[in-house]
Image (cartoon, rainbow, N blue to C red):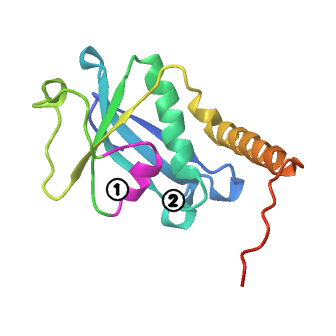
Amino acid sequence: LVFDRRHKSLAILSSDPEKKDCDDEIIGGICYRAYPEMRFAEIAFCAVSASQQVKGYGTKLMNLLKMHAVTEGIEFFITYADNYAIGYFKKQGFTKAVSMPKGRYQGLIKDYDGGTIMECYVHPTIDFTRVPEMIQAQKEFILERIRAGTAKSDKVVYPPLPP
């Protein structure tokens, strides 16, 4: 994706044999540069094919990258998002409030005019590839607790208000 030996890329390819060796084979990709001594990485490029958007590939790509980043000792991702990408990065856990000390990244990453700097903390013990299942399990647990609380017969019934 970026022809710089200091950058690494991750891509998702279609398993459809009809798309093999053509432009439609690439579903999406992400390119980053790690700064291991500073424990962060800059996301330089992230894209999903227009025909493949809103299918979860962007989330899958980011979650795979986060899992890989943990093996490299990466603690934070930082990126400059354009106005169209801010929503995507927010969905992936990025925030506009950068908590990483500026001295860790200043002078290392390129500043982009018109871009919004965003950061994501990468928790080392979370299995990011299982986030959808974890959220579903939490949702089911909460709904079960709500149902259990409303099923009790100890509800207080008050008389109606006078007319």
Residue ranking furthest to the front: 162
Residue 83: quarter of image: bottom left
Seen at 12% across and 31% down, the residue is 106
The residue that label 2 is drawn on is: 23
Would residue 33 be found to the left or right of residue 54 on screen?
left
Q: Which mark is residue 160?
A: none
Note whether 11 is above or below 72 in the view shown: below
| Local secondary structure at mark 2 | helix
What type is the residue that disc 2 sits on?
Answer: Asp
* Range shown magenta: 84-95
Distance from label 2 to label 1 (Cα)? 26 Å
**Discs 2/1, front:** 1
Image quarter of the C terminus = bottom right
Seen at 83% across and 44% down, the residue is 148
The residue that label 1 is drawn on is: 86
Label 2 neighbour load within 10 Å: few <14, some 14-19, many 20+:
few
Indicate the position of residue 33 as horizontal and vertical percent values.
30, 31
Note whether 133 is above or below 81 in the view shown: above
What type is the residue that disc 1 sits on?
Answer: Ile
Figure disc tally: 2
Specify which label sits upstream in the sequence, 2 or 1: 2
